[in-house]
Amino acid sequence: MAVVSGGTTLIDNGALDAGVPTGSLILLSTQTASASASIEFTSGIDSTYDSYVFKFINIHPSSDGANFQVNFRDGGSSYDAIKTTTAFGVYHNEAGDTTGLAYDTSKDLAQSTGVQKLDAQGDTGADNDQCGVGEMYLYNPSSTTFVKHFMARLNNYNSSNYSIGHFTAGYCNVTAAIDGVQFSYSSGNIDDGIIKMYGVA
């Protein structure tokens, strides 16, 4: 990549993006919900990749006003890894008369084993055309030295007819490896939708 100003190349080709990861996404698993209580990824999360990406495609709840959420397994049988997190969101309604940007303390966790809600500013509606989409990154889950960071970015069609963008980040404050990830709704089932897991080569 070169930067050009007035016809003069200021940085040689390739210099600007040197050191930037350019790895490919390797599809490891695809799961399709069908009135599923949860979707769990329990294999393929290991030291093969330093980073994993989960893609959420048209995730639709069975219950109106349910929150999409995640939890992590750290070697045991339960999804209860200790987490500290933060969350904020932006929103705009269909009427075009209400907008906002807000930090949502009710979605924060502080050294908690509970689920982390990924839709910081509002639930997803259960109308036939309502759903949520997004992605979550999980970094170095097999480390037994460092905490395991994760970041999520979602957008959903809220039960009150808002488009809401959600930003959630945090870390699993454990030195044990994270070997499982579970997605669910706060009430009811994941009625429909696809979640894909990728390794970053």
Image (cartoon, grey):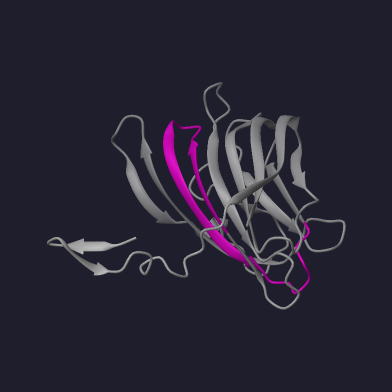
Is residue 156 inside the magenta stretch? Answer: yes
**Residue 79 percent coordinates (x, y):** 78, 56
Residue at 60 percent of width and 50 percent of height: 25
Farthest right residue in view:
77
Q: In which quadrant is the N terminus drawn?
A: bottom left
Q: Main secondary structure of the magenta part?
A: strand
**Residue 42 percent coordinates (x, y):** 80, 50
Work out whether 30 lies above or below 168: above
Residue at 56 percent of width and 47 percent of height: 135
**Residue 197 percent coordinates (x, y):** 67, 46
**Residue 67 percent coordinates (x, y):** 60, 42
Q: Is residue 54 left or right of residue 156?
A: right
Is residue 107 inside the magenta stretch? Answer: no
Q: Quadrant of residue 32?
A: top right
Q: Which residues are magenta?
A: 151-179
Q: Closest to the observer: 41 or 183? A: 41
Work out whether 63 lies above or below 108: above
Q: Closest to the observer: 136 or 159? A: 136
Q: Quadrant of residue 174?
A: bottom right
User: Looking at the image, can residue 124 be seen?
Assistant: no
Residue at 78 percent of width and 71 percent of height: 176
Residue at 37 percent of width and 69 percent of height: 15
